[in-house]
Image (cartoon, grey):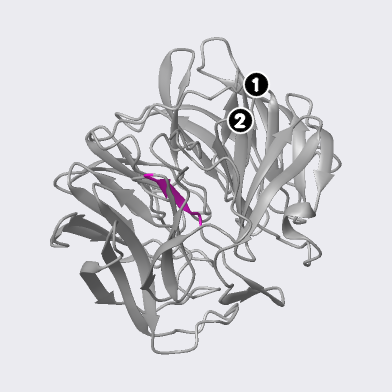
Amino acid sequence: MRTIMTVLLLYVFAPTSAADWPQWMGPQRDNVWREEGIVAELPAEGPKIAWRAPVSGGYAGPAVANGKVYVADYVAQDNVHVTNFERKGLSGVERIVCLNETTGKQLWKYEYSVKYTISYPAGPRCTPAVADGTVYTLGAEGNLNALDADTGQVLWSHDFKKEYGAETALWGYASHPLVDDNKLICVVGGEGSYVVAYDKDTGKELWKNLTSPSQGYSPPSIVNIAGQRQLLLLRPDAVTALEPETGTEIWSAPYQSDSGLVVMTPVLWNDYIFVGGYANKNMLIKLAPDGRSAEIVWNENVQHALSPINVQPTLDGDVLYGFDQNGRLYAVKLPDGERLWKTTEPLGKRPANSGTAFIIRQGDRYFLFTENGDLITADLTPEGYEELGRAHILDPTNEAFGRSVVWCSPAFANRRMYVRNDKECVAVDLAAE
């Protein structure tokens, strides 16, 4: 059995079932599925679909908590399956839909009209976050809502563009909000308000800090560095650590993104931090022993490391597994960034550019959900990639770079996978018999 190193991420959530998936990347925000009793092999005929529920457009993954599934979508009046680089205004209704986890029956929905001025305007990007009976949602144009998780009643809300003078980034708000103790931490934008912490119960602003050329798309995270909790932010122009309670800056290292395209959350390994983005903008940072300063070890390592633009890489020991902007899956050894191997096997012969598969670790193996709607079980080791099983789950309903895609970070909860496209959300039974 391979030894698996799990980076210590310190997130404080309300008590929920250990089997729930109440936020982006799961209970500990690390893409690790810790349930047991999961199928050893995918059935040859494919796993059973427990239910299908109609939803509309969006990239946001579902959240699962306390017997409910929360999905954010966009009911468009105009054609939204377009690139829209010219940022033409498109009309529609953004929604939060609550489904019964067992049956898929709709329990409630909350909706509001919003005009999209973003590229790839199919729908919201951010997975809802659920804590203490409240579901927090962030729409593609910066509408933040706190809703009663049982009824959908609005508890409080903020409009980032109106309140902070923020300008929506080209591809919309995509930095999943983070619940930390009594706070909800969001990437907002605007002067002095790149990141804002709110009281999660009242919506009152607790602190704000930093200014960047744009928001980018990287979600905030909290890690333990030299015994200190630090809020890590990958910004279009810097990698910065703040004190989570006050927003005070601890350290910062310059970073130069291309088109503001930073998507991944920084990965902490020992006393190093790895980040990467479009146009081979990868970088390794070394932290001081006291965790109060940092220096750049290498950057823009074109023939080494990887540059993620769609999905979060995952760390196993000292090896990072992730998809590069070229659509290939790499194994990268830290700290030197050596590429141990690469493969296109998860995506087959599809065009490689920006090819995407979401990677989730379960025990000693991995589940991958690919942009062509396949669920894969695989073994990822420093020696190579071995596919163990594959089943088609959802048909792609969107387009990117001339190919059909389904881009959705799935939820793994209660021995099921929950995932959506632009037409339906499905629950996939993965329980061992």
Residue 222 shown left or right of residue 156 in the figure: right
Q: Which mark is residue 364?
A: 2
Residue that mark 1 sits on: 1
**Three-letter code for the amino acid on which mark 2 is drawn:** Asp
Residue contact at pointers 2 and 1, CB within 8 angstroms: yes
Magenta segment = 409-414
Residue 69 position by quadrant: bottom left
Q: Where is 356 relative to 308, above or below?
A: below
C-alpha separation, residue under disc 2 versus residue under disc 1: 7 Å
From this view, report whether residue 342 is shown above or below residue 128.
above
Q: Residue at x 51, y 34 (%)?
A: 240
Circle 1: residue type? Met
Which of these two is toward me, 163 or 318? 318
Residue 410 magenta-highlighted: yes
Q: Quick check: 49 left or right of 403? A: left
In magenta stretch: residue 263: no
Q: Nearer the viewer, residue 238 or 57?
A: 57
- Label 1 sits on a secondary structure element that is loop
Rendering coords of residue 320 (x, y %): 68, 33
Instruction: Report whether 202 appears left or right of 324.
Output: left
Q: Secondary structure at mark 2?
A: loop
Q: How many marks?
A: 2
Q: Is residue 194 above or below residue 356?
A: above
Tag 1: Cα neighbours inside 10 Å, few (<14), some, or many (≥20)?
few
